[in-house]
């Protein structure tokens, strides 16, 4: 090759899920010990037939093949504003909504609107790897906050306060969290909000998993804060809630001024989110409230089944936190890397999970289990395979 590649991009980590999938490529699993794949956060069930029938019925319309408004189809912006207003018991206006090609793109656009090369963004450890990767690509410094296993994975706002400098543009939180599953209590989120507001930075909250909380209703009162738009930026995804990962649709809810900046970036990278994905999201918001609720209960029961399976202290692996789609486990093999442990689980126990080290520094003792694609009945089998792996290592 005679040309040079962008050094910032070359220095970014490889996409982690693809690496883990490589560990089992070409393998055939026996019927008595099938693969348990808890690596990728994907729902284990398809979208409802009513949704796909609806899409099949409209896909031939000429407008379905055309670009939409940069910020999204007006009806969807309106429907999402109404949904967020209802869910949070607060006022969110359609002009405060941008539809994006997935929540990942929402993060990318929001970060471009907030920060530039040399600026700093605070991320609690462990962080969602794509967040870090995007910031690295833009030359924006990631400032990590220590993982607080002692707080069930809930970050401490005081530790964020100590890390704010003149270059800090935002604190980014994910709740329910990927990778830990931790759900941040409303009082902690309120403290983060107050901190961000006082210090004149943004509080960005990724709520990809807000529809999978154990308890129904709003998980925080941030949208009820006076002038929430001055501080809060919410990112959301339609991927998991309506099983639309391939349709690529998500959103940013923020001040119209931020939406306007994000729209410039959106115009360049995609012009708009795919129309058919936007239609799928619109259908979901309008027709699938009961289906959404059923799946919330389904995930709640999976978390409960997982907790039950880990009640037995002899497993050797400690359940540090769990919620929504994820569990974060502390493995018993001190001194071994999380990657070594995860690879061994794939090889000897036919169980594919992700090493904590994919989610940042200091995570070698941890593994992430994304259990959304395994049912509650599989949780005891997960625990027994883990227990066996710990016993084999000891003997
Ligand atoms: C925290 C978080 N944000 C964003 C995404 C990506 O969502 P989308 O498919 O809407 O881009 C994921 C997917 O795993 C996620 O876990």
Image (spheres, grey):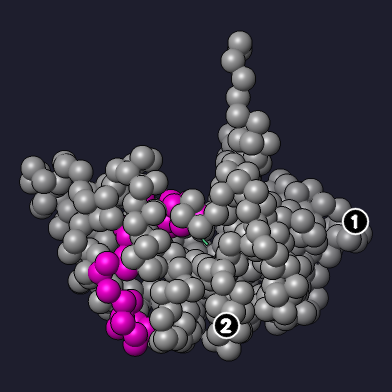
Residue 387 pos. (x, y %): 76, 66
Residue at screen point 69% across, 72% down: 160
Question: Magenta part of the protein: which range?
Answer: 84-111
Q: Residues within 10 Å of mark 2 (few under 14, many from 20)?
A: some
Quadrant in the picture for residue 217 = bottom left
Q: Nearer the viewer, residue 87 or 168?
A: 168
Q: Which residue is mark 1?
A: 335
Q: Nearer the viewer, residue 265 or 328?
A: 265
Quadrant containing the C terminus in the rendered view: bottom right
- SS assignment at label 2: helix
Residue 265 pos. (x, y %): 39, 46
- SS assignment at label 1: loop
Residue at screen point 56% across, 49% down: 116
**In this picture, residue 286 sits left or right of residue 241:** left
What's the mark number on residue 194?
2
Q: CA distance from mark 2 to mark 1?
A: 40 Å
Quadrant in the picture for residue 165 = bottom right
Quadrant in the picture for residue 261 = bottom left
Q: Nearer the viewer, residue 333 or 65?
A: 65
What's the mark number on residue 117?
none
Residue 157 pos. (x, y %): 67, 78
**In this picture, residue 93 sits left or right of residue 62:** right
Residue at screen point 56% across, 69% down: 201
Instruction: Work out whether mark 2 precedes mark 1 in sequence or the reverse, and give the earlier one.
Output: 2
Q: Nearer the viewer, residue 204 or 387?
A: 204
Question: Looking at this rendering, what residue extends furthest in the front direction?
Answer: 166
Question: Looking at this rendering, what residue extends furthest in the left direction?
Answer: 61
Q: Is residue 22 above or below residue 333?
A: above
Residue 336 pos. (x, y %): 86, 53
Residue at screen point 75% across, 49% down: 339
């Amino acid at each position: 090759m005679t040309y040079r590649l962008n050094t910032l991009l070359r220095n970014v980590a490889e996409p982690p899920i693809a690496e883990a999938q490589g560990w089992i490529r070409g393998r055939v699993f026996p019927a008595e010990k099938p693969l348990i794949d808890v690596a990728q956060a994907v729902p284990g069930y398809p979208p409802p037939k009513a949704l796909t029938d609806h899409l099949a019925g409209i896909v031939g319309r000429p407008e379905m093949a055309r670009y939409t408004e940069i910020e999204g189809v007006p009806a969807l912006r309106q429907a999402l504003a109404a949904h967020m207003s209802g869910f949070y018991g607060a006022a969110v206006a359609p002009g405060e909504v941008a539809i994006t090609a997935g929540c990942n793109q929402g993060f990318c656009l929001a970060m471009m609107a907030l920060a530039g090369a040399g600026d700093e963004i605070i991320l609690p450890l462990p962080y969602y790897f794509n967040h870090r990767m995007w910031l690295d690509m833009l030359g924006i410094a990631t400032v990590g906050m220590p993982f607080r296993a002692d707080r069930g994975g809930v970050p401490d706002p005081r530790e964020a306060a100590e890390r704010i400098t003149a270059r800090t543009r935002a604190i980014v939180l994910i709740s329910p969290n990927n990778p830990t599953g931790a759900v941040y209590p409303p009082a902690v989120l309120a403290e983060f909000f107050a901190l961000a507001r006082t210090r004149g930075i943004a509080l960005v909250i990724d709520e990809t998993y807000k529809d999978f909380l154990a308890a129904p209703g709003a998980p925080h009162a941030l949208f009820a804060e006076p002038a929430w738009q001055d501080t809060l930026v919410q990112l959301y995804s339609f991927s998991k809630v309506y099983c639309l990962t391939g349709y690529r649709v998500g959103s940013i809810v923020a001040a119209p001024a931020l939406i306007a900046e994000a729209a410039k970036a959106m115009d360049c990278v995609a012009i708009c989110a795919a129309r058919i994905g936007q239609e799928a999201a619109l259908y979901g918001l309008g027709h699938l409230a009961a289906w959404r609720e059923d799946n919330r209960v389904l995930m709640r029961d999976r978390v409960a089944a997982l907790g039950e399976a880990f009640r037995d202290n002899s497993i050797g692996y400690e359940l540090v936190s769990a919620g929504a789609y994820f569990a974060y486990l502390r493995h018993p093999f001190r001194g071994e890397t999380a990657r070594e442990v995860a690879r061994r689980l794939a090889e000897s126990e036919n169980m594919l999970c992700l090493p904590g080290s994919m989610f940042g520094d200091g995570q070698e003792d941890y593994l992430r289990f994304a259990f959304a694609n395994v049912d509650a009945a599989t949780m005891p089998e997960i625990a027994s395979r883990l227990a066996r792996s710990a016993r084999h290592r000891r003997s």
